[in-house]
Every structure is written in C-alpha cells, then in structure tokens.
Amino acid sequence: MSKVQLSLAVGDYEITRPLIDGRVSPDGVDLVVVSDIDSTTRHWRFLRNREFDIAELSASSFLLAREAGQPIVGIPVFPHRRFRHEFVFVNTSKSIRSPRDLIGRTVGLKSFQATAIVWMRGILESEYGVPHKSIKWVAELDEDVEFTPAPGLDLKRVPHGRKLEDMLVSGEIDACLHTDLIDPYIDGNPAVARLFDDYKAEETAFFKKTGVFPIMHVVAIKQDVVERHPWLPVELYKAFDRAKTMGVKRIFNPRVAPLAWWRSAMEEQEKLLGKDPWEYGLTPRNVKNIEMLAGYSRAHGMLKNAPDVDTLFHSVSQGRGRGGHRV
C-alpha cells in the first residue's frame, strides 16, 4: 500500500531524532524530514512561503498566525521548551545591576515576536516590574507575522547587516534579550555579562511560583493537508509522542552524554519539574502555559483577543478509553 509523502521541518533533538532517522514514522506517512535549518529560518519559511507540509513553529508566531487567519492547524506537540532568564545580556559599562535598571534603556531583540523574547519581556514586566513600554527596543530581524506596534511602543529595526552582539559590545545598545547564547559572552568578552548571575535560581523560583516550564515551539500543519488527510493530526501526534518516549529513555542512559553528573542532573530535573516536563497534549499545565504566553502577547500589543486554547489545536482524541494514548 502506498503512503502519503509529506515534508516535515523539525529541529534535531533527542526527542525528535527517531522521526528524523526513520525509527518512528506516522502510520500511513512517508516523511521527508528537513532538519538542517535554524529555528528562525524554519519558522519564517513555513509562515511566509508554506514550504513544508508540517513544521515545528514558534509558539508566539503560531498564535499571531492563527488570529490572522492563516491556513494552518496546530497539534498539541511542544518539541522545545526553555527557561529564559539566562539569555538577558548587558553591557558591563552601563551600570545595569538589576532588572529595573533596564527602564529607560535601549535594549536589543532578535525580533519582537520571537517566543523566547515574548517570555522574557513578559517575565521582566510581571515578575520584576519592568514595563515593556519603558524601554527603547531595537530588533534585528523582520517578524514571522507582520503586526502593527501598539501606541506608545518604541520599536525600531537595526540597519540591515548590523548584529545585536556587535552593538552590545560597542555600547550602542545597553542590553540584549536573545534567543541563544551570544558569541561575545561565550568568548569571555569583558564588555558583556548576564543580567542574572544566578539565572538558575531565578528560573527555579519562577517555576515554583507559576508551575510553568515555558513552551517555545508547537507543531503546525498546513490546513489543506489536514483537509485532504483528516486522520493525519492523530497519527502525527502519536508518532511525536513515541519519538519523545524513545528519546527520553535514551537520555536516561548515563553513557549517552560525556558529562560526569548527567544522571544527577536528570534526577534534579524530575524532582523539580515532575516526571514528564516535556508532556504533550492539552493537559492543564500546558493550557496554562499557552495562556500565559498569549497573555504576554496581548499585553505587548501583538494579539487583539485572548485565544481559546481548545480551538487553537486540532483534536487528537480517539475517544474516551480508546487508542491507548492519554491526551
């Protein structure tokens, strides 16, 4: 029997690798996997060009795209999560010692809409009293989904070809919220430091207060693909779930990573975050997570309305007590 051939753009993680190397495949589907692509490029190419049938996608851009009526469907699969306090960098000559020292400053962003940036900007405002409109923002990239900045928001683009990291080192910007570790910090440049020295303590406190391990990415499918193959969302969800189970099992093998305290780190994670902090499905924790991200997006003028999380994602239920998957 022939299978449906579909393209999937996804990051190469332990919990997705079984899909990439073919150990796991959705029933009835022959996947053509594209994984050698950075996240921001993948998101842009899916949302602007529809180059892939299925894609791992920025959660915040997904929310905006859905509100704008773009023909995409989500499934409640969240391949990437990350706490974000460690990605706030400052120029060491600017006397920025605490979050409120950012007020009135010029702060760089990879893009205003990037999920990592939305989380960090929202956390700075809600947890540390730094109003987002009290900062002059400069963004390096264009947005995945165009939006009109809210009145009173000071947001500019850096000139084409300029890099936030260089501008931070030179002092042209005072601080930077970034999606990744930046090269000047990795290289030990004395002009750059983290805002939060003990970022892990801050992230732990945030989780203990909110119960939220921030979702970065969702999985989206082109609407016309779902219309042609209405069985696909369930089979795709099941495949991602199997891949995650295999990946987590592999990670618990202490020989996988060349780190002396690997197992103890995993045990520490489980003690704090629970047995399955990477859980899929519209569980209460995941609904709260998406609602918090959507709340930050509304507060920052990107979303007009609070989305109904149940309608954002295609149902992957197979009926109560059926299918053997808890959703």
Image (cartoon, rainbow, N blue to C red):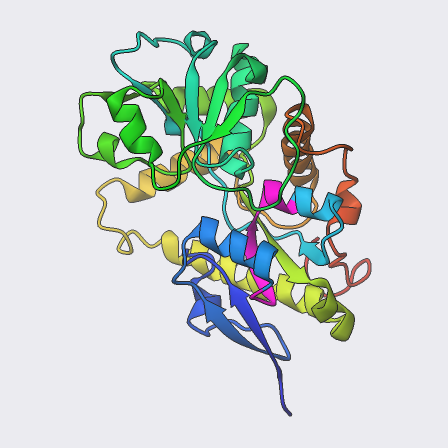
Q: As drawn, which residue projects farthest toward the bottom?
A: 1
Up the image or down, 224 lies above or below 63; here it is below
Magenta segment: 51-62
- The reply, left or right, for residue 233 in relation to residue 210 is right
- The residue nearer to you, when weighing 146 against 259, is 146
Residue 53 among those drawn in magenta: yes
Q: Is residue 241 visible?
A: no
Q: Residue at x 41, y 59 (%)?
A: 37
Quadrant in the picture for residue 186: top left
Q: Residue at x 55, y 63 (%)?
A: 242
Up the image or down, 228 lies above or below 17; here it is below
- The residue nearer to you, when weighing 162 against 78, is 162
- The residue nearer to you, when weighing 251 against 290, is 290
Residue 289, percent from left and from top? 63, 35
Residue 263, percent from left and from top? 32, 43
Q: Residue at x 22, y 50 (%)?
A: 258
Residue 220, percent from left and from top? 63, 57
